[in-house]
Structure formats: C-alpha cells, structure tokens
Amino acid sequence: MEYSNLRRQIIFMRKNLFDQGYLDEQFNQLEELQDESSPNFVEEVAALFFKDSSRLLTNIEQAIDKYPQDFYRLDSLVQQLKGSGSSIGALRMKNECSVFKVNCNDRNLEGCRRSLQKMKREHATLKQKLESYFQLLRQVGPRDYAVSSRK
C-alpha cells in the first residue's frame, strides 16, 4: 500500500510541475534518457543545473551592481541562464529570462532588477519542488525510478 501511495504522490507532483508551468517537454526528454544504467540521470542533470544557475544568478546580480549600463553584458549572462534552464525544461525560469532580455533591449535597468528578483524566486521555488520530487522518487527505488512522461 505504501508503494502505491508513493507512486500516486509522484504522479500528482509531477503533473503539478507541468500544469503550473514550472517544467516543459524538455524535462520529459531528459526522463526518457534515464535508464537502469543511469537511474539518477535526471536528478544529476538538475543538480548541475542548480549549481550552474546559482553561479549565473550571482554573476547577473554582480553585473547589475558593477556595470548597470552594460546591457550587452547583462544580456549575455541571461542568455547563458536561459540556455541552461531550457536544457532541463525550466519553463518559468526560461520565460523570465526572456522578460529580462526584453528589458535589456529596452535599456530598462529597473525592469532588469525586477526580472532578476523574479528569476531568483522561480529558481528557488523550482529547486525546492524538484528536490521534493526526487526525494519521493528515491523512496520508490530504482525499479520504477522513471515515471512515465505520459501520465
């Protein structure tokens, strides 16, 4: 009974991540790459994303403070973050990066600052939600680690 309850929780949590717009199809594609030879593949990719994206968010914040009128530099840093987010299917982060880039094109520093705060919130929320999701997956164990992407 415990096992089937955990499975239901995983399916519900995963569905919510998509329904609420946190993840997109790219996450499904990552899950399809996961198999018995690399049962933690998606979790490992996500961990690398969060490490890299945390560094990029810090770099963006520092660039806004040190070079507030260097919109080319800001745009370049946000493009890296957007690409990193796209690679794991972090839809909300990717979308907010697009907003930041529009603010860069408009040379709108205050818009960039607001967008950075939203990116940081989306980053923290996604990290918390995915950590909870992966924790449930670890409880289920490797035999059913990958949840069908079509459920």
Image (cartoon, helix red, strand yellow):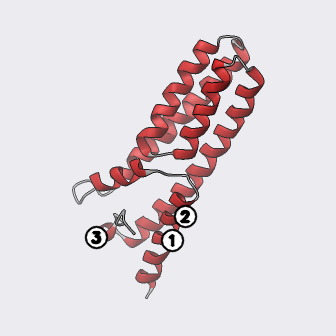
Where is residue 6 drawn, in percent x and y? 46, 76
Q: What residue is pinned by disc 2?
A: 16
Q: Is residue 79 left or right of residue 116?
A: left
Q: What residue is pinned by disc 3?
A: 143
Residue 107 numbered tag: none
* Amino acid of disc 1: Phe
| Between discs 3 and 2, the one toward the N terminus | 2
Where is residue 29 drawn, in percent x and y? 34, 51
Dot in front, 3 or 2 = 2
Q: CA distance from mark 3 to mark 2?
A: 23 Å
Kindly identify the residue that appears in the image at 65 percent across and 20 percent down. 104
Q: Is residue 89 left or right of residue 71?
A: left
Q: What residue is pinned by disc 1?
A: 12
Which residue, as the protein is rendered here, is positioned at the far left? 37
Q: Is residue 86 left or right of residue 98?
A: left
Q: CA distance from mark 2 to mark 1?
A: 6 Å
| Between discs 3 and 1, the one toward the N terminus | 1
